Amino acid sequence: MNTSLLSVDNLAVRFDTPDGAAHAVDRVCLNVHAGETLGLVGESGCGKSLTALSILRLLPVSARMSAGKITYKNDNLCEFTDVRMRHIRGREIAMIFQEPMTSLNPVMPIGLQVAEPLITHKLFPAADAYAKAAQWLEYVKIPAARKRMNDYPYQLSGGMCQRVMIAMAMVCQPNLLIADEPTTALDVTIQAQILALMRRLKGERQMAILLITHDLSVIAQIADRVAVMYAGQVMEIASVEQLFDQPLHPYTQGLLRSIPLPGTSGERLFEIPGSVPRLTAKMRGCKFNPRCIEAQKRCYNESPELLNRGKRHEVRCWIGQN
């Protein structure tokens, strides 16, 4: 757990807009250790998915990485050619994209879609890759998997499509799996099955997982450590136990207070005041200061760094600092 498989150092991603530069990812630093699950949590639009797409060099045309370094196994992925990155994608670092119903190719049978990474990376001949795909569909518990190899995505439920996406991501047995909102839009029963499947795959394959979600209950079930993002920045990194027992950043505290608890039916939920700043806004100090009920004068003038508060608990906040 001490070996850093992937390191993201001061990553910055921006969009050039008529209103100026939109800083969607701002000086993000993350480490994913071999064999662990790192949860990346935050509300929609905070930069989680762009951080993941940056790792695989799959940013949209309108976005550009303006600063930072991404290190995988001591190699800087930012220096890789497109050809070399294609050898990494799917084979060593795989990704489960959002919305499985739209991420799968609608005119290609699911068996061929699962086999395609093996064929593309020349790990197996086509016939063997197809047989391997059938095994993986069985492994992720697609009912009557071999009979459904020729089915198309529209013939499957959302939960089954998500299992196909997991099989596609896992078929080359990557070292790192990036799962972007893998349980969104699934009912709680299917969500529990998908999370159990990911835990089993992690345990049996000894891979690392970067799990992106806005759902803290999912984080509590599967993650080892958690990074909390807000407005493009990482505000807090801690173990799951530390984050839920002793959150240090006011934003994290607000998120946890917003979770409905058993026995509180009918009570008004806590809400963080204000709204997320525009990405083009030029702000001084901490990005959370307009919404922070504990903000001090320093919070409006100086931007805090992500600092260790002990026991690998890192916080970007002036509160509690000397």
Image (cartoon, rainbow, N blue to C red):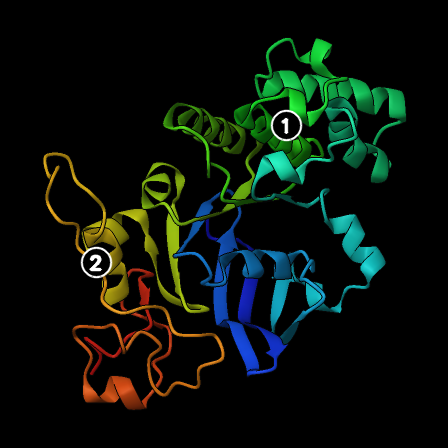
Please give the residue where the numbered disc 1 appears in the rendered image.
Answer: 164
Q: Few, some or many C-alpha atoms within 10 Å of disc 2 (few <14, some 14-19, many ≥20)? A: few
Snapshot quadrant of residue 294: bottom left
Label 1 amino acid? Val
Q: Describe the element under mark 1 as helix, strand or loop.
A: helix
Q: Is residue 191 shown above or below 150?
A: below
Label disc, if present, on residue 319 of the rendered structure: none
Q: Is residue 35 shown above or below 149?
A: below
Label disc, if present, on residue 271 of the rendered structure: 2
Label 2 and label 1: CA atoms lie apart by 37 Å
In this picture, residue 305 sits left or right of residue 266: right
**Residue 209, position in %: x, y?**
52, 44
**Residue 302, position in %: x, y?**
32, 88
Residue at 37% across / 28% down in the picture?
Answer: 188
Q: Mark 2 or 1 closer to N-term?
A: 1
Residue 242 visible, this orientation = no
Residue at 74% across / 17% down in the picture?
Answer: 149
Label 2 amino acid? Glu
On-image quarter of the C terminus: bottom left
**Residue 29, position in %: x, y?**
48, 67
Q: Is residue 64 shown above or below 43?
A: below
- Choose mark 2 or mark 1, whichever is in front: 2
Q: Is residue 53 shown above or below 11?
A: above
Q: Nearer the viewer, residue 68 or 183?
A: 183
In this picture, residue 315 sits left or right of residue 171: left
Residue at 61% across / 34% down in the picture?
Answer: 101
